[in-house]
Image: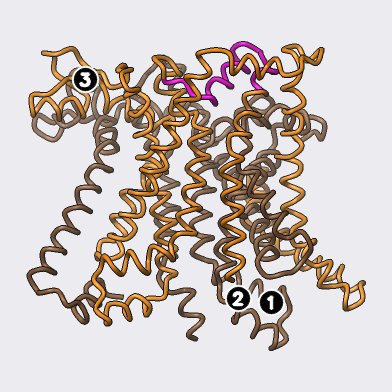
Chain colours: A orange, B brown
Amino acid sequence: MTDKLITALVAVVGVPAVMIGYIWATEQVLRVFPGRWKPRIRPWLWVAPAIGFLGLFLVYPTIGTIYRSLRDAADSAFVGLDNYAWFFGNDGSLSALLNNVLWLVFLTIAVVGVGLLIAVLVDRVRYETVAKSVIFMPLAISMVAAGVIWLFMYQYRPPGAEQTGTLNAALGVFGVGPIAWIQVTDFRLNTLMLIIVMAWMWTGFGMVIISAALKGINPELLEAARVDGANEWQVFRRIMFPLLVPTLVVVSTTMIITALKAFDIVYTMTNGNLNTEVIANLMYKQMFSFGQYGRASAIAVILLLAIVPIMLFNISRFRAQEAVR
Amino acid sequence: MSAVAPASQASPLSWAGRLRGRIGLHTILLLLMVIWAIPTIGLLLNSFRPAAEQTSSGWWTAIFPPYQFTFENYAHVLAQQGIGTNLLNSLFISIPSTVIPIFVAAFAAYAFSWMDFPGRNVLFVVVVGLLVVPLQATLIPILQLFATWGIAGTFLAVWLAHTGYGLPFAVYLLRNFMGSLPREVFESAYIDGASPVTAFFRLALPMTVPAIAALAIFQFLFVWNDLLVSLIYIGLVNPDNLPLPVSIANLVTSIGGGSEFLGAAAFLSMIIPLVVFFSLQRYFVRGIVGGSVKG
C-alpha cells in the first residue's frame, strides 16, 4: 500500500515538479554565461529534452531497424537488398500495399471531410457539447473493442434467418441483403468496411482539432463579413476555410500516417485474410509468426519511405507559412 | 457567443430561409449523432443481455418487453483477479505518460516558435518527420536498452517510451498553435522586461490551453488504450504492473472468444477516458487568442 502511495505521489506531484524544475535549472545554468551568449544557448536547453527522448526512442531504434533490414533472418550475414526484393516480388505484399493506398485515401477524406463538416455545424447549435461528445466517444474505446463492436454491426446470417447484425437488419427492412460485409472481396468492399470502422473512431479527432482552430478565429472577422452581406457559405469558403487550411493539413498528415500504420482493426477483424492485408499486419506476422526479423525490418523501412513525399509537402507548406509570419 | 445572434443581426436572408437553414442544420447534426451513437449503444445494451439472447436476436429487441437484462456479464468481469490493481496501474502509467510529453513538447514548441537559433526549421522538420516511425520497429532495440538499464518492467520504462512515441505529434501540434499566436504579445512582453521563462509560463502556456487540452486528451487515450507497449515493456518482466487493457485482452482471449463479456469489459475500461474527456471539454472555448490580443 505504501508503495502505491509513493508511486501515486511521484506520478502526480513529482513528475510535473521535475518538468518545471528543469526550466528553472536551465536559467541557473545560463547565469554562468556572459549576457550575449544566453540567447544563443537558451534555445538548445529548451529543445534538449525533446531531442534526447526522440534520439533515444525513435532515431536510435530506427537506425537499428534499417541495419537489420539488410541482414538475414538469423542476423548472421548481410543479404543486401534481398528482403526488399522479397517484398516487391510477391503478390501478397503488393496486395497489402494496394490496401494501404485505399486506407490512406478514404480514411483521410472521411476524417477531414466529416470532421470539418461537424466542426463547422456544431459551432452554431446550443447542444455543441453533447454532439461533440457523441462523435468523439468512439476514440475513447480501444481499437480492439471497436473492432468487436463493428464485427457485431456487420454480423451476417444466411438469408431467411433473423439478422442480429445492425446493418443487415436495417437493410432487411428495405428488402435488401443480407450482405456478408467482411467477406465480400469485390472492389475490396471488405477493406472499405474496415476503413469505415477507423473513420468512425477518428472523425472525432478531426472534429476536435478543427473545432479548436475554428474557435481561435477572431469572431469579429466573421461578423464583419456578415455585416457586409456575405452569406454563410461565402463566410465559410472565403474566410473560415483559408484560415483553417494549416489545421486541415495537420489533421490530414496525421490521418495519412495513421492509415499507413493501420494495424489493430485489421488484426482484430480479419487478421489480413480475404484480401484485407495491410503492411503493418504483414510486418507483425513476419516478426512474431515467422521470426523473419530481416523482412519485418525491411517492411518497417518501406513504411518509413512511403511517408517521405508527404513530409516533403509538409515542409514546403511550413516554409510558406513561415514566410508570411 | 449565442448561436443565432450573427444571422439575425446581419443576414440578408428572409425569415423563412433562415428557418429552413436551421432545420437542415439540426437534421444533419442529429442524423450524424444517431449514426455515431448506434454501434456503441448496441454494444452497451448487449452488455446487459444474457449470452443466449445476444446470439439469437439483435440488440434492438431489448428495447421492447419482455426485458431480459442482467448484470451477470459485469459481475463476471469484476470478479476477475486483480482488476482493481490493473485500474490503479493504468492511472499510474497514463498520467505521467501524458504530463511528461506535454511539458517536453511545450518547451521545444516554444523554442521552435519564438527563439532564434541556427538550424531551427531543419530540426523542427526532423522532429515532425519522426511521426512516420512505426512503433513496432522500435520495440526490440528499446527493450534491450531497458534491460541494460535495469528498468524493464517498471512504470518509469513505460513513461519514457510513451514520451518518446508521443513527442513528434505533440511538438507538431503545439508548435503550429504557438507559432500562430500574435507576435505583438511576445514583443510587448519582452519590451516590458519579461524573461523567456516568464513569457512562457505567463503568456505562451495559458494561450495554448486549447491545444494542450486537445493534446492531453489524445495522449491520455492513446496511452490508456495501448496494449502493445505495456505488453512488451512490462508484461514480459513484471506482470504485477500491467494496466487494464492487457487484463481485459487476456480476459477475452482466455474465455475463447467470449464476446458476451467483451461489452461489459469495454465499458468498464471506457469510464475513465470519458471522465477525462468531459472534464477537459470545457477548455475548448472560443476566443482565448482573440481575447488576449484585444485585452
Decide which of B41, A215 is in the foreground and name it: A215
**Which residue carries the number 3 mark?**
A179
Q: Residue B198, labelled with which disc?
A: 1
At 50% from the left and 37% from the top, the residue drawn is B84
Q: How many marks?
A: 3
Q: Where, by quadrant of the figure, is residue A322 drawn?
A: bottom right
Q: What residue type is labelled 2?
A: Leu
- Same chain assignment for discs 3 and 1: no
Q: Does the magenta stretch include residue A33?
A: no
In space, the residues marked 1 and 2 are separated at their CA atoms by: 8 Å
Tell whether label 2 touches label 1 (CB within 8 Å).
yes
Q: Does the magenta stretch include residue A280?
A: yes
At 25% from the left and 48% from the top, the residue drawn is B33
In space, the residues marked 3 and 1 are separated at their CA atoms by: 62 Å
Q: Chain under label 3?
A: A
A295 with respect to B22 (left or right): right
Please rate how many residues cluster around mark 2, counting C-alpha atoms within 10 Å: few if below 14, some from 14 to 19, many from 20: some
Q: Residue B203, labelled with which disc?
A: 2
A70 with respect to A233 (left or right): right
